[in-house]
Each structure stands twice: as C-alpha cells, then as structure tokens.
Amino acid sequence: MNRRNLLSVGALATTAAFSLHQQSRPSVPFRRKPKSKVAILKCASYESAHEVVDEGLRLIEPTVKGKSVLLKPNLVEYSPNTCINTHPTVIAAAVDSLYRLGAASVVVAEGPGHVRDTEMLIEECGLKKLLKEVGRTRFVDLNFDTPSRVKTTTSLTTLRELWLPNTLLAADVVISMPKIKTHHWAGVTLSLKNLFGVVPGSVYGWPKNILHWQGIDNSIVELASTVPIHYVIADGVEAMEGNGPLHGRRRHLGCLVFANDPVSADSTCCRLMGRDIGEIIHLAKAKPLGNPAESKIELLGEPVPEMRQVFS
C-alpha cells in the first residue's frame, strides 16, 4: 500500500471514529427557560458602575442567598490603551452587590489564555487593589487550580472529558462577566465564549489550542453545556469592535447587560452591536441552552433600538 492510500485509509478511519462518537453521545442538553430575563442599563462611565450593578442584579433577581458564587470575568492581557478586559470596577461592584444579596462567598476566578503571569495581570489592571478594598473575596488563577475530570455532554467535539478547576466545580452559582467585543473567528465574544478561560493552561497549555482544534464554535457550546452559566453581567460601557478580541477599536456602548440566561444575554448583546445573530454559529448551536428569540425574552431597562450601534 502506498503513502497516498495509507493517508486515505487514515482519513476514513478518523471520519468513521468521529461519526461513531457523535452517534454514541447525546445532543446539546435542553435547559431553555419558558422565558428569560435580560436587563440593559445605561452606564455612561465606570464611576457609576456600583449603582448600575446593584440595579441590574435587583432586576434579574439572582438566587444567591447562602450560596457560593464564582465570578468569571474576561481577563486576557493588560494594555492601558485598549479595552480588552472586563473592567475591574464592574467586577468589584458585582462582588459587593452579591454579598449584600446574601451570598455566602464570592470568588473571582479566571485562567487567561495569553498571559501566564496572572498575578501581574490583575495587579496591572487594578483588580487586585479593588478586590482588597471590597474584602471578603479572593482571586483564583484557574490555570493552576487543582483540576478534576468531568465528562463532556455533547457530540459537538471529540473530547470525551475535560479537566476543570475544582474551584469552578465547587461553586453553586457561576456568573459570566464578559467584555462586549467582536471576535475575528467567532463573530462575537460574550458570555458563552468567556468560558474558554475556565480551561486550565497547566493541563492544556497556552493559548489552549485544543479548543480551537475542535472548532471554536463547537468548543464554545461544549463548554457551555458542561459548565452551566447561571447569570451574566456583560461590560459594554467601553466595548470593542473590529479586529477583536485583542486588537479592535474602543467603542463606547454605554451600558451594562444583565441576564439569567447566557444565550439570551449574548443574543441581546449582538442586537446592541448591530450584529445578525443568524451569522453567529455558536449561538445557533446553543439554542437548547437558552432563548435567543426576542419573543422569549422579558426585556427590562432600556429598549434595544435606543441603545443599538453598528459595530464593525
């Protein structure tokens, strides 16, 4: 058998294995609510973030009393001239508000996919100082947190398991806190894509290419199926357009978005960005996890048309 035939046989074997894998695994689990809540609140600057976060959480009524809460912001790398990361003021405001709502504990946790020195990142961006001022919370670097094996839940990837941080798995409530940005491959990077940061670099390396090799949209939905997001607080005060998630331009959207459903949150953020949600592949695949349709969303706060901009 020559080399070309061997390669052909190998390709067929891989295809057959993936086909069997898909047949043996369930589809995306159905978690859609009859109706989801999304609140869009104006926030002209980060100086008013504490008041806006208080109001947003009041509107979506998160069930956090007596529970352990994990906040998963989007922290990638620091540059004073860009708006890559979830703003530290919004993160600190969320910690403060959740304790006032009766949360037993609040942990801020992230595993950056680019910078390996997470301690330097949180110090440079100002988050370390703000969390110290708020008190009663700690930051966990998910890249180096002790992981445990978790079975995946869909047939979208060939991954049969993920090694996920124990701090994440121990939380009663997971709140995704993305920065509202465009993404050069996924279209947008919002609460669902934000879960890439829970995959530990100490296991999968940097920049966690295993997720990209499986297909970025498939991996987004696989993670969201395996690690349910209970609530969303999206930072759109200063958003990003163009060549996101790292090199795009600053766009003042002037709002924070709150939701009890990540699919509803991301669909609403797409509408605020002037993006057609039909073009966002991972949102289409994630439909069983939440409500993308406006008719299934109880929209609170500002109407979308009043806040909408057209992002490049």
Image (cartoon, rainbow, N blue to C red):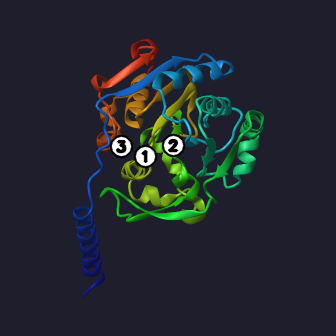
Residue drawn at (49%, 47%), measured in percent from left and top?
195
Q: Which residue is mark 2?
A: 174
> Is 36 rendered above or below residue 43?
below
Residue 65, horizontal then vertical, whole percent: 54, 35
The residues bearing labels 1 and 2 have C-alpha atoms spaced at a distance of 7 Å
Residue drawn at (51%, 43%), measured in percent from left and top?
174
Q: Residues within 10 Å of mark 1 (few under 14, many from 20)?
A: some
Residue 9, horizontal then vertical, whole percent: 24, 78
Disc 2 element: strand
Q: Nearer the viewer, residue 312 or 71?
A: 71
Residue 70, horizontal then vertical, whole percent: 57, 44
Q: Nearer the viewer, residue 41 or 87?
A: 41
> Is 288 rendered above or below residue 114?
above
Q: Residues within 10 Å of mark 2 (few under 14, many from 20)?
A: many
Q: Quadrant of residue 151?
A: bottom left
Q: Is residue 241 visible?
A: no
**Which of pointers 3 and 1 lies earlier in the amino acid sequence?**
1
Residue 116, horizontal then vertical, whole percent: 67, 55
**Which of pointers 2 and 3 lies earlier in the amino acid sequence?**
2
Asked if marks 3 and 1 touch (Cβ < 8 Å), the reply is no
Q: Quadrant of the N terminus?
A: bottom left
Q: Would residue 22 appear left or right of 245 to someone viewing this image?
A: left
Which amino acid type corresponds to the residue marked 2 in the rendered image? Val
Which amino acid type corresponds to the residue marked 1 in the rendered image? Pro
Disc 3 element: helix
Which amino acid type corresponds to the residue marked 3 in the rendered image? His
Q: Which residue is mark 3?
A: 282
Residue drawn at (60%, 51%), measured in percent from left and top?
111
Q: Which residue is mark 1?
A: 228
Pair 2/3: label in front: 2
